[in-house]
Amino acid sequence: MTAILAVDQGTSGTKALVHDGERTLSVVEVPVRPAYLDGGRVEVDPLDLLASVRQAGTRALREAGDPPLAAVSLANQGESVLAWDPATGRPLSTVLVWQDGRAQDICADLGEHGELVRRRTGLMLDPYFSAPKMAWLRRHATREGVVTTTDSWLVHQLTGAFVTDATTASRSLLLDLDEVAWDPELLALFGLDDEALPRVVRCDEVVGGTSMFGRSGAEIPVAGLVVDQQAALVAERCLDPGMVKCTYGTGAFLLGAMGERAVRSTRGLTSSLAWSLRKSTGYCLDGQVYTAGSAVRWLVDLGLLSAPDALDAESAGDSGGACFVPGLAGLAQPWWNPKPCGAFTGLGLATTRGRLVRAVVEGLAAQVATLAQAMSADVGVPLTRLRVDGGLTRSHALMQAQADLLQVPVDVYPSPHATALGTAALARLALDDELSLPAAIDEWSPAMSFEPIWTEQRASEAMARWEQAARCAAARKDNA
């Protein structure tokens, strides 16, 4: 069977995986380090992103033994944007990463249109999404070229095409979620109505061919374009309403399938496309914790943790009443405060370094639990298990805290490469008209499951303390 080169271009690095339909032949990861600047600004050099894609893909193919390739697929960050020259492909700005909050004034100026935006797009008017950052680049960086999400630029580098997939477009604040088409009124609202926009394509569509990775002869088809979190949703087979996954990476991202109708949340969550295929369109609800892995890295940078993988060893058995709100890059659902508002509360003279680390573990789990409870209420289907993936699932302390605070079992996906495997499955759909979505996805069983140990009362009391701390943190409007 011919192989897929699946590329997962993420916030902290690029992963390339070669999969032959039955097994993974190689995995290569190339790090990328965004710059975290004052004022909630987060940016990265686009040429670093491109170099990481090229290096990871080339090395992965070499390490897999240069197998015959059927396609190259690409998962992307979703809401990170840049300006670039479509004639040359040359970047005209840095990449404003999805965590970047510099466009909050643009959102504040458009505040009266928030309900229109939510109704039309399923999203909240917030600088997390693409359009405010695109508008900021036009006002403050350059009027030249085009402004798009990073996937459009990377695909142009791969194939010369000017496209974006429907899931990425659904994260922009510019797409009518029900029509799956750019919305002229929203484009005008953000001052982007004169922009050249990429064509919106399906996730199972071949968009061109590439020779980027050193292959001689015919170009390799490029397909399986999708947002990274939706790719993980697919890989974990969360295909039916009520099935929920959380990916613990730079941030923590909770997505729940909701079928072929775009339900609008009544609890501050957002609605997006889960996939757009020849045979079906799926929608999902989602909630974000902006800083998860980046919060752990922050602990390391402060000297409170010796290394990211020391989380379990250096976390105390309890937090001693300390609470942590992971709002280091703002808080999303349901508070929607884009300004940095991270907080420790409940500190005392008995608070040790280990208890601070434990408070971070429980704070991350508590925010995910808050989102999961809201999602269950929106979908109307009780959550019975949570499927999880990502680097932080290696922390038994975090996974146990997640099960305890959410009071449901937590099932750990057996591969650390869910996003890459999800985009590879979508690429296979593009190559085979007869293949169904379930048939394209590998069956799996948990590598490990965590059952709740805490009593329901203890979990309820801990969640109440954390939610009070979160409300206080989110109410702060005077952050730098």
Image: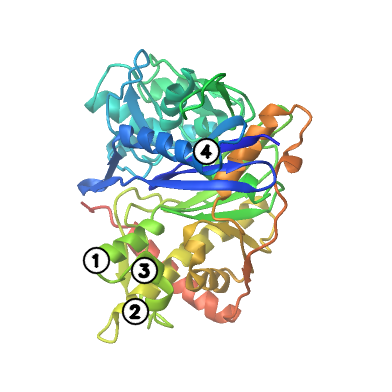
- Residue 394 location, x and y as percent? 50, 65
Figure disc tally: 4
Mark 2 or mark 1, which has the lower sequence index? 1
> Dot 3, crowdedness within 10 Å: few (<14), some or many (≥20)?
many
Q: Which residue is mark 1?
A: 302
- At a point 22% along the width and 27% down the height, the residue shown is 140
Mark 4 or mark 3, which has the lower sequence index? 4
Note whether residue 132 is visible.
Answer: no
Note whether residue 145 is visible.
Answer: yes
- Residue 377 location, x and y as percent? 62, 56
> Dot 4, crowdedness within 10 Å: few (<14), some or many (≥20)?
many
> Residue 324 — which label?
3
SS label for mark 1:
helix
Residue 36 drawn above or below residue 322: above
Q: CA distance from mark 1 to mark 3?
A: 15 Å
Q: CA distance from mark 4 to mark 2?
A: 42 Å
Residue 200 drawn above or below residue 456: above
- Looking at the rendered image, the quarter that the N terminus falls into is top right
- Residue found at the very far front of the displayed protein: 65
SS label for mark 4:
helix
Nearer to us of marks 4 and 2 is: 4
- At a point 36% along the width and 12% down the height, the residue shown is 87
Mark 2 or mark 3, which has the lower sequence index? 3
Three-letter code, disc 4: Leu
Q: Which residue is mark 4?
A: 61
Q: Which residue is mark 2?
A: 354
Contact, CB < 8 Å: mark 2 with mark 3? Answer: no
- Residue 86 location, x and y as percent? 37, 16
Q: CA distance from mark 2 to mark 3?
A: 13 Å
